[in-house]
Image (cartoon, rainbow, N blue to C red):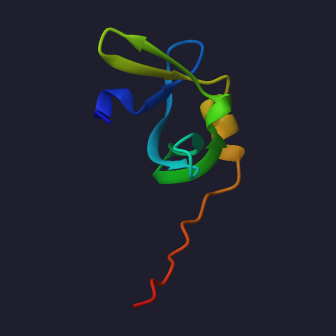
C-alpha cells in the first residue's frame, strides 16, 4: 500500500493514525487493522476492526476515515505483536 494511502483520517480530514498491518481471514477478507498513533514522543499501535474504518477512493488513492480522534486512539489498549515459533 503506498504511504499516502496508509493514513487514517477523521471527519475533519486530520490524520489520526497510520496503518501498520492488516490481518485477513482464510477467505481473504480484511478483519483487523493495526493503526499506529503518534504519542508526541514515540508511537503506539492499536488494533481496530476493519468494519470501523470507512474506505473510498480519491482518484488512484485509497482514503481511510474513522470517527475516532487521536486522543480516543491513544486511550485504546496497545496492540502487542506475538512472535510465533515456526516448526521445522
Badge count:
0
User: Vertical placement of 55 versus 18: above or below?
Assistant: above
At x 70%, y 36%, the residue is 72
Residue reaching furthest to the front: 27
User: Considering the image in quadrants, where does the N terminus appear?
Assistant: top left
User: Considering the image in quadrants, where does the C terminus appear?
Assistant: bottom left
Q: Position of residue 71 (x, y in %)?
A: 66, 36
Q: Position of residue 49 (x, y in %)?
A: 66, 40
User: Vertical placement of 12 versus 80: above or below?
Assistant: above
Q: Is residue 49 left or right of residue 6?
A: right
User: Vertical placement of 69 versus 43: above or below?
Assistant: above
At x 28%, y 33%, the residue is 2
At x 71%, y 45%, the residue is 75
Q: Position of residue 60 (x, y in %)?
A: 29, 15
At x 46%, y 40%, the residue is 19
Q: Position of residue 80 (x, y in %)?
A: 58, 65
* Residue 74 in which image quadrant: top right
Of 53 and 12, nearer the camera is 53
Q: Is residue 35 left or right of residue 4?
A: right
Residue reaching furthest to the top: 59
* Residue 12 in which image quadrant: top right
Amino acid at each position: 500500500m503506498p504511504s499516502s494511502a496508509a493514513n487514517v483520517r477523521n471527519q475533519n480530514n486530520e490524520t489520526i493514525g497510520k496503518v501498520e498491518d492488516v490481518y485477513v481471514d482464510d477467505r481473504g477478507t480484511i478483519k483487523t487493522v493495526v493503526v499506529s498513533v503518534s504519542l508526541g514522543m514515540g508511537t503506539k499501535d492499536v488494533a481496530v476492526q476493519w468494519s470501523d474504518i470507512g474506505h473510498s477512493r480519491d482518484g488512484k488513492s485509497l482514503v481511510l476515515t474513522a470517527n475516532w480522534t487521536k486522543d480516543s486512539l491513544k486511550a485504546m489498549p496497545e496492540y502487542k505483536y506475538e512472535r510465533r515459533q515456526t516448526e521445522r
